[in-house]
Image (cartoon, rainbow, N blue to C red):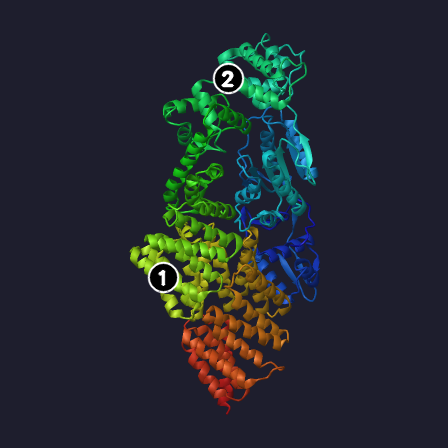
């Protein structure tokens, strides 16, 4: 990315377009416009010097500071920019070429600051998990202004204060004010539900929608936000402070445009942090004796506001005003304590409330003269409030403390215990606790959800330990979420879109808590069962590291009665997939999947067999074991036939089609793939769940490659575009990466450099943002491939070498042959024929080892060209290789490779005077061509045919 000269917040307008420079967002009117990254960089440079001529060498140096490219690449990107802007259409002029010098942006340009931007623009900004704007906040306006100012000046601010003082309230208000004042996304992370500090980066990554592929998601988070202007809010850091502090410091160091706002009961104490000690609400002083005097202070305003909100008809008078002031002072201006006290006025009046509060303070304070510590004051207030509860209310409050985050009425009834309280009484008690501000309600969802504030939960949990059989309550909690997960699985598998997954994300905190508790028990049966049921949800949320942790523990704790059962099948299947995605294609992943399949076969569980066979096919396909992958594809067909399920047969056809495509039987592959695409409905959520990717999409993109190799270039290109669009709608990172990788190969083969480059940039950005390291490396590899195809071997060779090392490290071998092939061509361009020959031989050895025989014909052709180099000059051997390549292409039906090799062989014969033989060869190959006449391979072959025919006619 080029340096940005414009200050943060600049918006540049020209014609019907506007560009937010820092955000790199281009719009035409109100509609966002996609512009490839390099073309966008060029636009920014030209706008920075609008009206002036920018030298083409300077432009290249700024847009490609670390890469050597030729002027052709610059012209290509200028062309892309002009096309997107509509340059030349209806008289519009934007970028002018100045012959011999460079380029100039000639359209009139105007600037404005973000603060002047309209509400429409602000509405477009992203808010990750940010709670709604508060309808009313008392006594914190100046505080919010100060915090926003500190964020602007220092970037990293921690709001510190005791529990219940209002840190979260202030943080949310500051976030909304900041979003009104400045461009950029706002991301809110509630760390309160986390029991394990190690989960902080994972939770942050999940909220940002990142695919977690490693034990430490921090690099993925940094990669995603590094170049963004964002505000990150880390709420409730105190119980996970070390992990939260480490993440915050990492963001501060490596994401210079990101601002951090944390809330905690203590400072994080890391680099860049500026602490804001949140004061209590200002209390009325002793001399405030009248209503007007008392209500001049925020603490009293909050008290009266909450009294009236409780439905009371209370009217504050001068006689009660000093008592209200005294209550606020005794509660140290702590918002939560004031709200609790205010909720009691409707029952006890102001004087009665003050008396009850006084009793509680004497109990804790022993009549000390000095003020109590704030946390003790809050404890006293909670003690007092708890003492006013009915037996049913206190029972529900205590037992509700086992919930982490939100819970439903159904969950509360199950955990409270039907033997102790009927559903009706539990509902009444819960509603009463909501009225008394001890339990909060989340609105805006289809099911009412409840939550204890953190301080209230900690207090109630201590009471649970004192008064109840806490193990019994925790067990009921675990059993409820076990049943919930098992029941939810059926619903989950019928959802049409990944958007439906958000319905169970709020339950993950409770599932984690239940897992933590159940694995601490002597009897691990509940833990094992819960892990089995919850693993699919964890995978769905891309929490692969967590899934691996729990499934490993569960398998270690399987008792004899559970070994060899469907429960072990589910655990092994989840462990294998989570290992594959978090640690690469390891032997441990293969072992887990094979064990799961072994048990599924012993049980006669056909659906599980198909799922595990599909995952093992994926494993071997990713590791380059194409022959073994074919074996599993054939097994999938056998299982699918027994199931008598059209969807299962279509899935098996998808696997068989992919394998036959790689194993050189292209016509057979086409049949299977067309069957799969025709019988699997438009991509649905369920398809992504069964294999970790989408059957239809995988079959479709493989069919595109197959069609191209069979000689149907136009159909292949159209299908590749269609499948890539469909993959983008799935919100499933792996599926999209696979679609883009394979679509790029079609574009590269077809000479469509523009489509290839756009897909490559999308692939690399997508994989990098989601820490899918193997696919990022593959994206860099195909970027190198493209550079070589364009003749830029200096840029391409380092990228290809890097990709080969990185993909091998992750045992991702799918693209190995293609990269080695491009490496050989690049080395030949560089005049390193001997090295190119070694690379070609290495690639052919890889084909022989892995079994991706469809590549053999093209590799033999490339090796033949290497042998024609001046430093080698072995023409007989080159001719022999071309003939072998021709035979290999015909054997697998790869008419596209046949055309390329025929062109190479005819060119060799022409150099030897064999004009008539060249004509016969080319005419024979070209006569079967029915489309793709604009493809460079066809154009080159026809041009050569015309020349040879002319020479043959001349005698």
Callout 1 crowding tier (Cα within 10 Å): few <14, some 14–19, many ≥20: some
Secondary structure, mark 1, is helix
Residue in the picture at 41% in, 36% down: 479
Rendered image quadrant of residue 781: bottom right
User: Closest to the observer: 67 or 931?
Assistant: 67
Q: Is residue 672 left or right of residue 76?
A: left
The answer to whether any part of residue 496 appears in the image is: yes
* Rendered view: 272 above or below 571: above
Which label's residue is closer to the chain start, 1 or 2? Answer: 2
Q: Residue 367, located in which quarter of the rendered image?
A: top right
Q: Which mark is residue 387?
A: 2
**Numbered label attached to residue 635:** 1
Please provide percent x and percent y for residue 752: 52, 66
User: Residue 831: where, in percent of width, then height?
Assistant: 64, 76
Q: Is residue 208 above or below residue 263?
A: below
Q: Is residue 153 left or right of residue 828?
A: right
**Residue 639, position in %: x, y?**
33, 58
- Along the line of sight, the residue nearer the viewer: 146 or 860: 860
Q: Residue furthest bottom?
A: 955
Secondary element at tag 2 = helix
In the image, residue 942 lies at what x, y percent? 49, 78
């Amino acid at each position: 990315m080029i340096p940005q000269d414009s200050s943060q917040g600049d918006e540049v307008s020209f014609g019907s377009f506007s560009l937010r420079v820092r955000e790199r967002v281009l719009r035409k009117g109100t509609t966002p416009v996609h512009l490839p990254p390099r073309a966008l960089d060029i636009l920014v440079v030209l706008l920075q010097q609008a009206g002036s001529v920018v030298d083409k060498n300077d432009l290249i140096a700024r847009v490609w500071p670390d890469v050597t490219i030729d002027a052709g690449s610059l012209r290509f990107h200028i062309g892309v920019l002009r096309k997107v802007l509509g340059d030349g259409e209806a008289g519009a002029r934007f970028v002018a070429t100045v012959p011999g010098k460079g380029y100039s942006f000639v359209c009139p340009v105007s600037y404005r600051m973000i603060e002047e931007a309209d509400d429409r623009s602000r509405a477009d900004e992203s808010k990750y998990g940010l709670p709604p704007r508060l309808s009313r906040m008392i006594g914190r306006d100046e505080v919010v202004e100060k915090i926003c100012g500190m964020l602007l000046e220092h970037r990293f601010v921690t709001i510190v204060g005791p529990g219940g003082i209002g840190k979260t309230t202030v943080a949310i208000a500051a976030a909304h004010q900041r979003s009104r004042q400045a461009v950029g996304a706002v991301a809110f992370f509630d760390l309160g539900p986390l029991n394990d500090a190690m989960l902080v980066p994972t939770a942050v990554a999940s909220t940002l929608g990142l695919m977690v592929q490693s034990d430490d998601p921090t690099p993925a988070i940094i990669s995603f936000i590094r170049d963004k202007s964002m505000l990150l809010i880390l709420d409730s850091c105190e119980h996970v402070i070390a992990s939260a502090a480490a993440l915050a410091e990492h963001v501060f160091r490596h994401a210079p445009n990101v601002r951090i706002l944390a809330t905690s009961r203590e400072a994080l104490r890391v680099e860049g942090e500026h602490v804001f000690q949140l004061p209590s609400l200002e209390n009325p002083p002793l001399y405030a004796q009248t209503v007007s005097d008392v209500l001049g202070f925020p603490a009293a305003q909050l008290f009266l506001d909450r009294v009236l909100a409780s439905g009371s008809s209370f009217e504050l008078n001068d006689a009660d005003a000093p008592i209200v002031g005294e209550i606020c002072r005794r509660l140290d201006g702590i918002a939560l304590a004031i709200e609790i006290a205010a909720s009691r006025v409707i029952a006890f009046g102001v004087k009665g409330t003050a008396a009850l509060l006084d009793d509680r303070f004497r109990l804790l304070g022993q009549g000390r003269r000095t003020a109590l510590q704030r946390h003790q004051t809050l404890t006293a207030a909670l003690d007092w409030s708890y003492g006013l509860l009915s037996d049913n209310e206190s029972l529900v409050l205590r037992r509700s403390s086992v919930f982490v985050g939100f819970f439903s009425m159904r969950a509360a009834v199950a955990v409270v215990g039907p033997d102790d309280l009927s559903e009706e009484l539990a509902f009444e008690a819960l509603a009463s606790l909501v009225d008394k501000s001890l339990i909060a309600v989340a609105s805006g969802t289809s099911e009412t959800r409840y939550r204890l504030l953190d301080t209230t939960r900690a207090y109630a949990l201590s009471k649970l330990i004192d008064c109840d059989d806490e193990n019994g309550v925790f067990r009921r909690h675990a059993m409820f979420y076990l049943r919930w997960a098992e029941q939810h699985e059926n619903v989950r598998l019928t959802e049409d879109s990944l958007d439906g997954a958000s319905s169970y994300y709020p339950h993950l905190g409770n599932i984690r808590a239940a897992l933590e508790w159940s694995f601490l028990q002597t009897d691990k049966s509940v833990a094992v069962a819960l892990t089995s049921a919850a693993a699919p949800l964890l995978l769905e949320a891309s929490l692969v590291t967590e899934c691996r942790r729990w499934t490993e523990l569960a398998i270690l704790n399987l008792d004899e009665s559970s070994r060899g059962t469907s429960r072990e099948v589910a655990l092994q299947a989840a462990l294998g997939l989570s290992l594959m995605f978090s640690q690469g294609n390891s032997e441990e992943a293969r072992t887990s999947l094979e064990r799961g399949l072994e048990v599924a076969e012993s049980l006669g569980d056909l659906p599980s067999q198909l799922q595990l066979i599909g995952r093992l096919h994926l494993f071997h396909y990713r590791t380059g074991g194409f022959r073994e992958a074919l074996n599993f594809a054939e097994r999938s067909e056998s299982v699918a036939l027994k199931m008598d399920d059209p969807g299962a047969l279509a899935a098996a056809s998808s696997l068989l089609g992919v394998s036959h495509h790689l194993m050189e039987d292209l016509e057979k592959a086409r049949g299977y793939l067309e069957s799969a695409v025709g019988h699997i409905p438009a991509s649905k959520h369920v398809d992504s769940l069964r294999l970790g990717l989408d059957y239809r999409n995988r079959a479709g993109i493989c069919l595109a490659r197959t069609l191209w190799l069979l000689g149907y270039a136009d159909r292949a290109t159209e299908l590749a575009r269609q499948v890539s669009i469909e993959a983008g709608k799935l919100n499933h990172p792996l599926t999209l990466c696979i679609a883009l990788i394979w679509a790029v190969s079609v574009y590269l083969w077809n000479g469509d450099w523009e489509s290839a480059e756009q897909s490559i940039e999308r692939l690399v950005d997508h994989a990098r943002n989601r820490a899918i390291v193997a696919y990022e490396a593959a994206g860099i590899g195909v970027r190198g491939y493209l550079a070589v195809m364009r003749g830029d071997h200096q840029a391409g060779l380092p990228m290809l070498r890097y990709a080969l090392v990185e993909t091998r490290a992750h045992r991702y071998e799918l693209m190995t042959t293609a990269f080695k092939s491009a490496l050989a061509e690049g080395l030949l361009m560089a005049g390193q024929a001997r090295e190119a020959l070694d690379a070609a031989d290495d690639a052919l050895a890889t084909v022989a080892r892995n079994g991706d025989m469809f590549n053999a014909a093209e590799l033999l052709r490339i090796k033949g060209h290497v042998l024609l180099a001046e430093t080698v000059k072995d023409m007989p051997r080159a001719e022999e290789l071309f003939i072998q390549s021709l035979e290999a292409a015909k054997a697998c039906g790869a008419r596209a490779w046949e055309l390329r090799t025929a062109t190479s062989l005819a060119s060799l014969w022409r150099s030897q005077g064999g004009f008539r033989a060249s004509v016969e060869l080319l005419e024979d190959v070209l006569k079967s061509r029915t489309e793709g006449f604009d493809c460079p391979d066809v154009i080159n072959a026809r041009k050569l045919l015309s020349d040879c025919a002319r020479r043959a006619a001349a005698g």
